[in-house]
Image (spheres, rainbow, N blue to C red):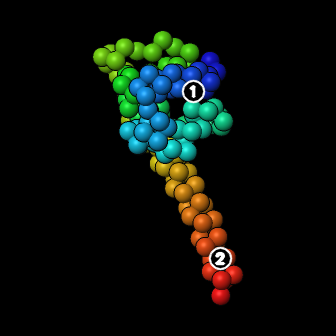
Amino acid sequence: MSEDWAAVARAINERVNELGWRQRELAERSNVSQAIVREIQHHTVERRRGPRTLESLSTAMGWHPMHLDAVLHGRRPPDRDEPIMDPGDSLWSRLDTVEQRLIDITERLDDLKSDLASVAKQVRENR
């Protein structure tokens, strides 16, 4: 079955509106970077995400940890109190999480590099 990232975006947007949160608040509560939350919420980039990303977002919004994964794969989301059948604690899952964090760090470093280049240019021009 294919992945339906548009359905994930709709589910997140509806829930965030219900809760009265902004994107930044969801990012902070879920410990998912705001850039990743933005990509998922606006369905701008479709790429494989680590299972913990959707799990963190689901949990932060008060859903079962596997809620968004179920939405992504066209399944009925589990009730909040249902047991977790696949905790996603495999080596592959953890590697996915590390990979995603490295991507986040790389994006932040690229932003810093750009900012530093701008500051250096301004300093040179003001000499």
| Residue 104 x/y as whole percent | 53, 51
- Find residue 77 and report its image quarter: top left
Q: Is residue 107 left or right of residue 19?
A: right
Q: Is residue 59 left or right of residue 22?
A: left
When the figure is inspected, residue 99 is found, relative to residue 116, above or below; the finding is above
Comparing 15 with 48, the one in front is: 15
Q: Is residue 43 left or right of residue 63?
A: right
Q: Earlier in the sequence, mark 1 or mark 2?
A: 1
As measured in the structure, the alpha-carbon distance from the residue carrying label 1 to the one carrying label 2 is 40 Å
Q: Secondary structure at mark 1?
A: helix
In this view, the mark in front (1 or 2):
2
- At 44% from the left edge and 32% from the top edge, which residue is drawn? 21
- At 53% from the left edge and 26% from the top edge, which residue is drawn? 13
| Residue 91 x/y as whole percent | 43, 41
Q: Is residue 60 left or right of residue 45?
A: left
Q: Which residue matches tag 2?
A: 122
When the figure is inspected, residue 106 is found, relative to residue 13, above or below; the finding is below
Query: Which residue in the rendered view is the most extreme toward the front?
Result: 126
Q: Quadrant of the C terminus?
A: bottom right
Q: Say which amino acid is labelled 2.
A: Gln
| Residue 17 x/y as whole percent | 48, 25
Query: Which residue in the rendered view is the most extreme toward the top?
Result: 76
Marks 1/2 in contact by CB < 8 Å: the verdict is: no
Q: Is residue 48 at all visible to an observer of this figure?
A: no
Mark 1 burial class by Cα count in 10 Å: few <14, some 14-19, many 20+ = many
Q: Which residue matches tag 1?
A: 9
Q: Quadrant of the N terminus?
A: top right
Mark 2 burial class by Cα count in 10 Å: few <14, some 14-19, many 20+ = few
